[in-house]
Image (cartoon, grey):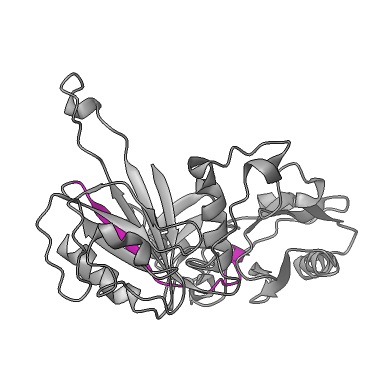
Amino acid sequence: MRRLLIGLAAAGYSTGVAAGVWQIDSLADGSLAFFENDGTLIDGTTPVITQDSVFVALGRTTVGAERSVLIDRGTLSYNKYAYLAPRAKIMVHGDDGTGAATLGKLVFPTIVAGQTYGYVITDNSKPVETTSRTKIYPYTAITGDTATTILTKVVALINADTTRVCNAAILSTNLGVSFTGITAGVDFKALPYMEMKTLVAGMVVEGIGAGGAATSAIIDGVFYSATTTITLTVKYGHSPVLLVQSGYVGEGTAAEIKATELEYSPEQGNINAWRMINELWKVPSRVVTGQTYTCYVIEWIAPNTNVNIGQLDGNPKQTLVLAIPVGDAMITAVDNILAAL
């Protein structure tokens, strides 16, 4: 079971509205409420929970309240995700120029006329069948070219593309090239092409750390952090400040919640029909455009009740996602209840 319940701003937690599940349809539209499995409403301020399972309900004024299946307290786990605004993704080929060491810098061997240098950049936000998803930006060296002229011309090729997914820039006098997303939250991948792949120690770095300096990063496809066998600092020479991009796609955006709503809709009856979809699926989205959300991902495994099935062979993990508008009183109530579970 996968279920998504989306609250509405200012709806609040339902304490004092419904005495129990028998009054579930009195819940305000977009208001959440937790109940014990005997139907008792759980108070959001001082929750007292005595039963071994609970369920969550969402008030809906037009079609009646929606409720989850029973949530087993014994196997329950959850994560809370605060809203995080999308940020522009950053990648670097070579050194980012922020530290004294330059272990990953670009070093050009002897440049020969006719060699091809460039980058392959893939816009991961486009479907794989879209031919414009991946673009190649090549430059063929001529007699007299230097590292400076080659990098300058390759970067110019990228930035001259009016439909590009990122901007390119030379770093630290040819020690590296940065790629910065034009649109916050859009994923892309930049990789060296042809002779650009052979530059001495020219690492491709994708930072995934948070805070000031990146605490972890992917270098040439391998993950490094402060705890890996070869640490990030040793591998790269320093913690790359430039690569601060954890959660660049954002958390709790309206677009993210709407995508989850669509992903979970088959379990609500959306069969993704090629024909007559308007007749077969007419459920309107509950996502409010521009709204930001705090999200809870609650997981558990319902215990087996069939004596013919062993516990280890049992039921699959079940997931309930709660999306609550940022700043709503429901967040405090849900925090209190989940802590009590």
> Residue at point 83% right, 69% down?
156
Residue 76: say if magenta.
yes
> Magenta part of the protein: which range?
75-96
- The image shows residue 288 at horizontal and vertical percentages of 57, 70
Q: Give the side of residue 313 with respect to residue 110, left or right.
A: left
Q: Is residue 273 above or below residue 250?
A: above
- Please tell me which residue lies in front, 136 or 272: 272
Q: Give the side of residue 136 with respect to residue 286, left or right.
A: right
Residue 100: say if magenta.
no
Taking the view exactly as shown, the residue that stands out farthest to the right is 143
Q: Does any portion of residue 313 appear in the rendered image?
A: yes
- The image shows residue 119 at horizontal and vertical percentages of 74, 55
The quarter of the image holding the C terminus is bottom left
The quarter of the image holding the N terminus is top left
- Please tell me which residue lies in front, 319 or 104: 319
Q: Does any portion of residue 134 appear in the rendered image?
A: no
